[in-house]
Image (cartoon, rainbow, N blue to C red):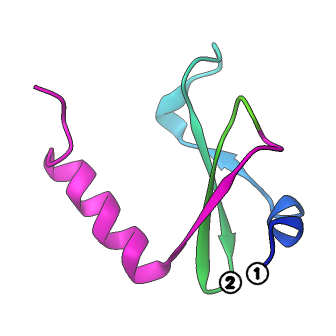
Amino acid sequence: MTTRNLSTLKWRKASQSGHQGGDCVEVADASRLVAVRDSKDPDGPKLAFTSSEWRAFTRRITSGTHDLP
């Protein structure tokens, strides 16, 4: 999938992000991929993960593996 195709996806913010702006990411379901972008820079770089990569990543985030000390 090209970056141009990622631009046409339906993007959504996490429900925990609130509406005050700040540091948020948005995700979009891209068929067999999960796309991720910075909500402050929607035309900027985007990442794409397979569904299994995304599940593994979110499991690690939820478990606290990537928490700062």
Amino acid type of the residue that numbered disc 1 sits on in the rendered structure: Met
- Residue located beneath label 1 in the image: 1
Q: Which mark is residue 39?
A: none
Q: Is residue 3 left or right of residue 35?
A: right
Q: CA distance from mark 2 to mark 1?
A: 10 Å
Crowd rating for badge 2 (residues with CA inside 10 Å; few <14, some 14–19, many 20+): few
Q: Please give the name of the residue rendered at 83% of the width and 44% of the height, measured from the top-left corner.
A: 43
Q: Please give the name of the residue rendered at 26% of the width and 50% of the height, measured from the top-left corner.
A: 61
Q: Are marks 2 and 1 in contact (CB under 8 Å)?
A: yes
* Outermost left residue: 69
What range of the chain is rendered magenta? 42-69
Q: What kind of element bears circle 2?
A: loop
Residue 27, quarter of picture: bottom right
In the image, residue 68 lies in the stretch drawn in magenta: yes
The N terminus, quarter of image: bottom right
- Residue located beneath label 2 in the image: 31
